[in-house]
Amino acid sequence: MTRATQVCHSGPMDALRGRWRADCALVAPGAESRVVDDLGRDLLRRWREPHRRYHDATHLLEVLSAVDMLCASERVAPQDRAVAALAVWFHDAVYAVRTPRTNEAESAALAAEALALLGVDASTTERVTDLVLSTATHELGSGTRQDTTADVVHDADLWVLGAPVSRFDEYCRQVREEYADVPAGEYASARSAVLRPFLVRPHVYRTTHGRRSWETAARENLARELSRLAA
């Protein structure tokens, strides 16, 4: 997987619009096309807000691609794959740099409102909103894995940690740009506090594919960035 370029161009945006319709069709086959398209336009507008540098439509494309890869590897059913994809669509739909602690809660509320308009059943809506909320902390969990869909969302959102060096380093620069107003020392301390727990826990990823394919690179990338932040 490589970083998508020029996401604002018609090709990738058309692909995202088509993907949104397809994901909605699996969980809301009776939804009006006008409602589906209106909600999709609003979501894409949000993902293209000018203050976003990393948490933008390219990130959305990358995480959806990772969802597809993981669902194929983990043999996730189409309905569950759609739930994971919808969670990804909404997980950073609200992204405010100045009030980051409320982003996931507001994104989950937005998801609940949108899925209600689509006529999605309460059980599926709850699954989607719970997955959106889970991206606030990316806790690893303990014991035997119970929810493969949750594991897929967890690992897909963290794909970039195990990305090729050039993409990972670009990601680090982009996150710093989003917080350009934060003084260097304060940023280094806060960012290290976010990244360090991933390095010290037994595994970065939950899925078999994530651990087999991305784990080693993620640990190397995280160690390198933590060293840079400490310099």
Image: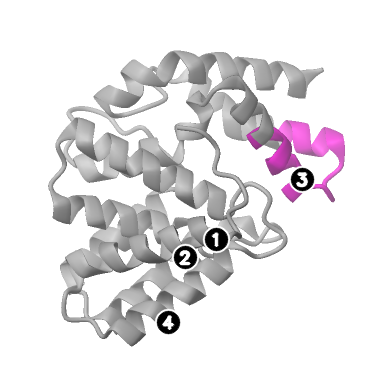
Which mark is first along the chain, 3 or 4? 4
Residue shown at the point (30%, 75%) measured from the top left: 115
**Which of the labelled discs sits on residue 103, or is there none?**
1
The secondary element bearing badge 4 is classed as helix
- 148, 44: nearer the viewer: 44
Labels 1 & 2 near each other (Cβ < 8 A) = yes
CA neighbours of label 3 inside 10 A, class few (<14), some (14 to 19), many (20+): some
- 181, 43: nearer the viewer: 43
Q: Is residue 48 above or below residue 223?
A: below
**Which colour scheme appears in the figure?**
one colour
**The N terminus, quarter of image:** top left
Q: Which residues are magenta?
A: 171-189
Which residue position is annotated with label 3? 177
The secondary element bearing badge 1 is classed as helix
Residue 108, given in percent of the width and then of the height, sits at: 41, 65
Residue shown at the point (59%, 59%) measured from the top left: 9
**Which of the labelled discs sits on residue 38, or is there none?**
4
**Which of the labelled discs sits on residue 227, or is there none?**
none
Residue shown at the point (21%, 69%) measured from the top left: 25
Locate residue 220: give its quadrant. top right
CA neighbours of label 4 inside 10 A, class few (<14), some (14 to 19), many (20+): few
- Discs 3/2, front: 3
Which residue position is annotated with label 2? 107
Q: Is residue 136 visible?
A: no
> How far, Cα to Cα, is label 4 from label 1?
22 Å
- Discs 1/3, front: 3
